[in-house]
Image (spheres, rainbow, N blue to C red):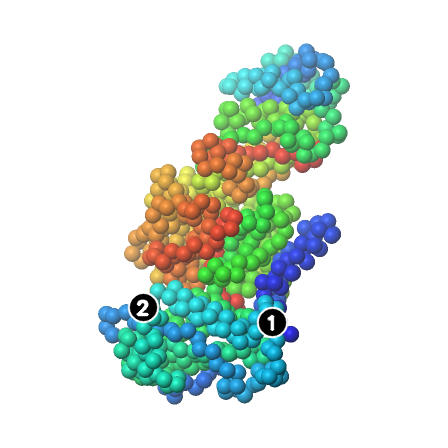
Amino acid sequence: MKLDSRLLSTRLALPAVLLLAGFACSSVNRTPATGSDPTAGPMAPEASEAASEPASDPEPSNSSGLTEDEILAIPPEVGSETDLLDIGAKSLEELNTEGHLKDVQFEYDSAQLSAAMRATLEENAAWLSRYPSVSILVEGHCDERGTVEYNLALGEERARAVRDYLRDLGVGSGRMRIISYGKEFPLDPGHNEAAWRRNRRAHLEIVAK
Amino acid sequence: MKPPRLPRLALGLLGAALATGVAAGFVPVTGIAGFAGSASRAVEVTSLGASAAENARQDAGDWYLDITRPGAPVRMAIPDFRLAPPEAAESGIRAGETDTASPEPLDDAGFTPAEEAAESASVASAVLWSDIEYAGVYRMLPKRFYRIAEAGSPDGVLDYYQWESIGADILVSGTLRIEGEMLVAEVRMHAVRAQENVFGRRYTAARGAARTLAHRIADDILQHAGNYQGVARTRIAFSTSRSGPRSKEIYLMDYDGYGQRPVTANGSLNITPSWSPDGRALSYISYREGAPALYLAFLYQGRGEKLVGDFQSFTPAWSPDGRWIAFTSNRDGQSEIYLAAVDGAELRRLTDNRAIDVAPAWSPNGRTIAFTSDRTGAPQIYTMDRDGLNLRRVSFEGSWNDSPAWSPSRQHSEIAYASRIERRPFDIVVHDFETRQTRQLTTGRGSNESPSWAPNGLHIAFASNRAGDDQVFTMHRDGSNLKQLTREGSNTTPRWGNPPGNPR
């Protein structure tokens, strides 16, 4: 338990807060999802705001007012009775095109995670914590300006950085695999700054549910 | 019955491989398009006993000095192949059983044998010319001058004075005919001023293999005329997007871009090929099972195997002795350079640090490995001994240097790589270890990447997006004589290989 406590204060605090934020939102929006557009679930914007707040907090703390045990006791299926997606009814392709997990964009020749990227990953971690059966492939991609060979390794570094941070946020290692595509599969075929920015990314692909 | 020509056979096998995969519901394990039919591309060579001096001179390796005028380029005349009637064959083989009175049977393409012979002669003449010209060591005498010399040499009698009068130092003349299923060429090379027939050989290849025949002749001519190692029979492997969206396949082509044909056909991502030193196999990275794994493709056995499958593997490089593949793996959590024995018996790690280490390239003697590392913060070129010791940094200029390629030349000790100065696109540069100078071969036209040396160390293949998509180009080692080889889809990471079965 001692180890758990330390982990909780340093690592689990963020997802726990997120989880609570999500829970709070879902409490407010207790109406069932309409099904017409389940992707833009009512909690998305709020969760985003909640996520950005603790990310900029230099000393993340347990501000929920709950005890550690209470936080740990929150079961992952907490929202299942209300607005959780029926992921079993959707194909992997649908889940991926619906965009539940968001890409993060890197700087040129960098695998560093910025505060904004961490915030996005925290959203992703929160989503993953609600769907513990989901496994993902973390794809590292690069823009076309780098060389083929080095970009393969750089893409891997990017995927690894994302995987490691998600793991720190409580997503089990067994649910994640990483892969680098270097610059082989650009998202945007353009040859300009906007395209390059979109292509320097880590993409989270749902591969099992 | 004529043997099928290679492209048709290769496509047939490719189709079969795809059909098998589709029928079975999985990607073919090997996915190697077969090259078993390449046996029909073999060229047999016999000496015509051109001159008594031929062998002696050849061994001495200096006869060509006789025809060289100090300071002047050596001028070569290569008239088109003349068609020789089959009955002129010295070997006495008759051209099939066809009675001359009966109508000539047409071949698959609807040619009569005479037309096919003429077409073969035309192809062989053009290929021989461009192969010799490509070497860049001879001044090619324009064919329009030859009529003068030929007019003065009636009935096939060679008049050396006529050829000397138009400025020829070397004359290469040949005949070509069809005998049964074979294409037969007889080629003689003459030192014009010495009035000597210094080379005479008969070449026999399958009908339809005129290009292959001419390539072999060209390499022999270059070898005997100037002890020059030609590249006419070499091939270039590369990765291409032409076969479909979200996939890349390994292809190969002749050095001149002709005969572009698939090696893999699995619809996945197949990248960064590297030749075995005997030119008969490729190592490459394939994502066909998900994670990028290291595969070997044995072209002439139509066989493939996965050599390293766990974790991610990148950028393989086959050692000059043929026994090892250097590559990058993340099995310890970082990108490190490893050696894997080709027989799968051993795996060794060469680097160990938190930085990216990628793109290994062997020195010609196999004792040193160049690679890319960002251990100082930006990708730069380094070398190390093949046991991982004796690390040295090679590149100091540029913010991003990658894809080192060690020249196989015995005359020049140098490494080519892609270099970015400031934020400009990449250019191909060459670092000379002896002079410690770095020279730039391409200059700011598009982004130029992934250099690979021809086996003779005198040409470099590379990928450039100067014309839009990435395409494979070749150039001389001084940056001249630029040629674009690919045009369909995006084509990257060219690797120039030895002729099959002919390690250096």
Residue drawn at x 59%, y 28% as measured from the top left: A102
* Residue farthest along the left direction in this orientation: B71
Q: Amino acid under label 2?
A: Arg
Q: Are marks 1 and 2 in contact (CB under 8 Å)?
A: no
The mark that comes first in sequence, 1 or 2, is 1
Label 2 secondary element: strand
Q: Chain of mark 2?
A: B
Q: Secondary structure at mark 1?
A: loop
| Residue under the point 34% across and 83% down | B153
Q: Identify whether A170 is placed above or below B226.
A: above
Residue identified by numbered label 1: B107
Image quarter hosting the N terminus of chain A: top right
Task: Point out the frontmost of discs 1 and 2.
Answer: 1
Q: How many residues crowd mark 1 within 10 Å: few (<14), some (14–19), many (20+)?
A: few
Query: Residue A143, image x and y in percent?
Result: 48, 38
Residue B4 appears left or right of B240? right
Residue A55 drawn at (x, y percent) = 53, 20
Amino acid, disc 1: Asp
Reply above or below: B141 against B86: above
Quadrant for the C terminus of chain A, please: top right
As drawn, B448 above or below A161: below
- The residue at which mark 2 appears reads as B139
- Residue B105: image location, x then y, percent: 61, 76
On whether disc 1 and disc 2 are found on a single subunit, the reply is yes
Q: CA distance from mark 1 to mark 2?
A: 38 Å
For residue A33, which quarter of the picture? top right
